[in-house]
Image (cartoon, rainbow, N blue to C red):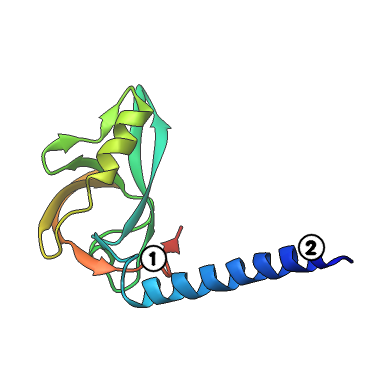
Amino acid sequence: MNETVWYAIWIVVAVVVLTDCIFRVLYQKGYFDRNVVGIRGKVRQVEGGYGLFIEGIIPNSPAAKVLQAGDRVLVMDGSSLFSSCEKEVRESYHRIQGPEGSMVTLRIARDRIEKEYQIARVKTRYDKVLST
């Protein structure tokens, strides 16, 4: 191999190593933390439109105390999470994030029973999410 190829290989390796180092430092400093209640949701088609279902829960999060994977989120802070437009439900779901310590009110359907919960938002990382 000629000298130019070796320089190119060296540059690629250096970029990969530096990117990994930068990511690790940012992760340790909390730049990837999010203020969440601790759920991973999925928009699914239901009769007449689309709804939001809980697909996973972050262990030891506020949501883990009251919610279960498979629950359907009907209402979030007074706004319906049912629509004929999938994109609308998806965008509404992203509003679940908010300031740490603030509360979000969710009306949940589980086994045809509806309950309302107030859940605190906490700063967390997405290392683990328990799935169905």
The amino acid sitting under disc 2 is Thr
The amino acid sitting under disc 1 is Tyr
What quarter of the picture does the N terminus occupy?
bottom right
Category of crowding for the residue at label 1, using alpha-carbon neighbours closer than 10 angstroms: few (below 14), some (14–19), many (at least 20): few
Q: Residue at x 45, y 75 (%)?
A: 24
Residue 104's x, y, as percent? 14, 53
In the image shown, does 18 or 110 lie closer to the viewer?
18
Q: Residue at x 29, y 74 (%)?
A: 60
In the image shown, does 70 or 16 lie closer to the viewer?
16
Q: Is residue 89 visible?
A: yes
In the image shown, does 111 or 116 lie closer to the viewer?
116
Residue 98's x, y, as percent? 17, 54
Q: Which residue is mark 1?
A: 126
Q: Kindly state the secondary structure of the residue where label 1 is placed.
A: loop
Instruction: Please state which of the two labelled residues, at mark 1 or mark 2, is closer to the viewer.
Output: 2
Q: Is residue 25 left or right of residue 72?
A: right
Q: Is residue 23 left or right of residue 35?
A: right
Q: Which residue is mark 2?
A: 4
Q: Residue at x 37, y 78 (%)?
A: 28
Residue 87's x, y, as percent? 36, 30
